[in-house]
Image (cartoon, rainbow, N blue to C red):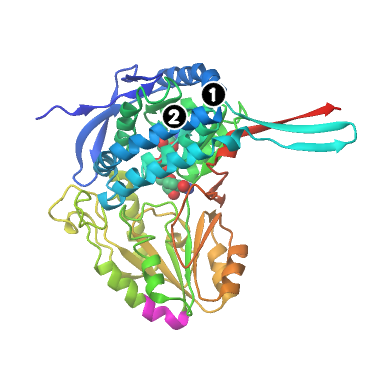
């Protein structure tokens, strides 16, 4: 058997194995086979990474906005050159289809790092306030210091970028803790970053959440945390960070409503509630998945027919094939969790279509973690399939009659990450934007995001945004004139 590639952490500008020498398996979710090994970093590696980030901070934060922008443009250029390879590697690691991962990690990340480069000036701009005839107020922004970025597996490179590009743009240095289920693409990025950024400015440590993750978020050398992942882990991190009072940004789970009114463009809505939302290239493992499809009763049958027709066209299979439109779930654990919900759903609601899973769905790749697009139907939003985040290609359709009813069902969730509204009524669209308890609202479109806008949740979906000014703190002075 060929030797498996062994990846290393990026610490202080050097590629280093875990100090303990321990490794974790990187599993290809389309086959269930181990294809590489990644470091099982722990407290020792985290200590080294935070020390490197602290050491790099004075020089990095002293650069001018223009000098920092120059470095970030170099990272953007790196994505222009290597984005496609990084995308393919990420597909091997987390199963998201190449059709999504290549544009995302090539042009998408080039754009994101270029955008961050264009914002560096914002972080060094303050206010002048005339307080009275003899006093002048001034504000100045400064970077926090070391930012800990804890990222999930469903989009490792773009999550690293959304956090690190803007934290670095503001003059911070960064330690990234990658997710144990999918670290290979970001560790490969770490190899490419050697010599591009000054040593210690961006560090990447792979390891288990309970070891490397916990050590990082408790670390007294960390000045702010930004984490994307599940609500449960967000709570653990908030508790762990309490002793040091470390401020945090949390982008957590969701159970987003996608609301279709009878007056909507049903062609667009049918795509928006399926391929764009839950029946996606990474099998609905999308934080903003519109996993509750609310449909106004007069168009319910019409929408059911259209949704079924789209689901039947989903091509589930090898995510490295460009003809594939949906890949596997990321891991055995995620597969077991989703299959559990398929079983619960079949007991508590009506199965409209789908529900098959495992080798039966993709016989040519029997070791993969396959679940086919699945739709349940119910009138009862209190069911667990309506309240729990499933994180798979599984949605529930819920009929409604009035605007008030739609809003009540939409907001009847502990989460508040995203919501979609499909209508031609402009006033209704604005009312729903105002009244939906959700950090992000889409109208007649779904899941388009961009770092140009704040992206984040409310309620159990977290708080804060990975934006440049949130990686700065403000201080003020009053000067007697
Ligand atoms: P997770 O919460 O298990 O893990 C996220 C990260 O936290 C991983 O790097 C993990 O190692 C780390 N971690 C785990 N325990 C930790 C601890 N005790 N201390 C410090 N770090 C720890 O989530 P996941 O399974 O990787 O991702 C799935 C979840 O993430 C879903 O619920 C999904 O909605 C959410 N998600 C949200 C967004 C968003 O933008 N809001 C984006 C992607 C995923």
x and y percentages locating residue 480 in the rendered image: 86, 26
Of callouts 1 and 2, the N-terminal one: 1
Circle 2: element type: helix
Q: Count every numbered label the image shows and give the total.
A: 2
Q: Examine the image and state in which quarter residue 119 appears.
A: top right
x and y percentages locating residue 97 in the rendered image: 27, 51
Report the front residue among 397 and 440. 440
- Residue 63 is tagged as 1
What residue does disc 2 label? 71
The answer to whether 202 appears left or right of 314 in the picture is right
The answer to whether 131 appears left or right of 306 in the picture is right
The relative height of residue 80 versus residue 19 in the rendered view (above or below) is below
- Quadrant of the displayed image that contains ligand 1: top left
Q: Examine the image and state in which quarter residue 143 appears.
A: top right
At x 24% / y 38%, what residue is drawn?
Answer: 27
- Give, as a single range, the part of the protein colored magenta: 297-303
* Dots 1, 2 in contact, CB < 8 A: yes
Q: Which part of the image, by quadrant, shows the C terminus?
A: top right
Q: Which part of the image, by quadrant, shows the N terminus?
A: top left
Report the front residue among 373 and 342. 373
Residue at mark 2: C-beta within 8 A of ligand 1: no
Residue 342 in view in this figure: yes
Alpha-carbon span between mark 1 and mark 2: 10 Å
- Residue 97 is tagged as none
Circle 1: element type: loop
Within 10 Å of the Cα at label 2, are there few (<14), some (14-19), or many (20+) other Cα atoms?
some
At x 40% / y 40%, what residue is drawn?
Answer: 152
Within 10 Å of the Cα at label 1, are there few (<14), some (14-19), or many (20+) other Cα atoms?
few
């Amino acid at each position: 058997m060929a030797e498996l590639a062994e990846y290393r952490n990026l610490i202080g500008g050097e590629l280093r194995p875990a100090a303990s020498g321990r490794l974790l398996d990187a599993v290809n979710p389309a086959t269930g086979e181990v294809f590489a090994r990644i470091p099982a970093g722990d407290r020792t590696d985290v200590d080294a990474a935070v020390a490197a980030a602290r050491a790099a901070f004075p020089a990095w934060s002293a650069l001018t906005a223009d000098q920092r922008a120059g470095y970030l443009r170099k990272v953007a250029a790196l994505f222009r050159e290597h984005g496609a390879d990084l995308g393919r590697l990420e597909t091997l690691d987390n199963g998201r289809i190449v059709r999504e991962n290549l544009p995302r990690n090539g042009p998408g990340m080039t754009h994101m790092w270029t955008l961050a480069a264009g914002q560096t000036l914002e972080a060094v701009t303050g206010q002048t306030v005339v307080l009275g005839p003899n006093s002048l107020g001034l504000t100045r922004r400064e970077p926090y210091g070391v930012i800990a970025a804890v990222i999930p597996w469903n989009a490792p490179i773009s999550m690293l970028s959304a956090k690190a590009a803007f934290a670095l743009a503001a003059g911070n240095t960064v330690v990234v803790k990658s997710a144990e289920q999918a670290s290979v693409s970001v560790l490969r990025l770490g190899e490419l970053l050697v010599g591009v950024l000054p040593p210690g400015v961006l560090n990447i440590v792979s390891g288990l959440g309970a070891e490397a993750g916990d050590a990082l978020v408790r670390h007294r050398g960390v000045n702010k945390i930004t984490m994307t992942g599940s609500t449960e882990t967000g709570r653990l991190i908030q508790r762990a960070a309490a002793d040091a009072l470390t401020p945090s940004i949390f982008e957590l789970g969701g159970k987003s409503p996608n609301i279709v009114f009878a007056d909507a463009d049903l062609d667009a809505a049918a795509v928006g509630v399926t391929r764009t939302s839950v029946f996606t290239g990474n099998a609905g493992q999308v934080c903003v998945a519109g996993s509750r499809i609310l449909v106004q009763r007069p168009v319910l049958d019409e929408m059911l027919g259209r949704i079924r027709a789209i689901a039947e066209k989903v091509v589930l299979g090898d995510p490295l094939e460009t003809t594939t439109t949906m890949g596997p779930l990321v891991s055995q654990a995620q597969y077991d969790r989703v299959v559990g919900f398929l079983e619960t759903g079949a007991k508590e609601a009506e199965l409209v279509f789908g529900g098959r899973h495992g080798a039966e769905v993709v016989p040519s790749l029997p070791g993969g973690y396959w679940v086919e697009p699945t739709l349940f139907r119910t009138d009862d939003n209190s069911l667990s399939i309506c309240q729990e985040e499933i994180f798979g290609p599984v949605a529930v359709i819920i009929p409604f009659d009035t605007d008030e009813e739609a809003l009540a069902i939409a907001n009847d969730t502990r989460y508040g990450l995203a919501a979609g509204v499909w209508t031609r009524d402009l006033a209704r669209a604005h009312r729903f934007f105002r009244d939906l308890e959700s950090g992000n609202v889409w109208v007649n479109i779904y899941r388009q995001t961009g770092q140009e806008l704040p992206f984040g949740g409310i309620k159990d979906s977290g708080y804060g945004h990975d934006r440049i000014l949130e990686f700065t703190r403000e201080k003020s002075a009053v000067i007697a004139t």
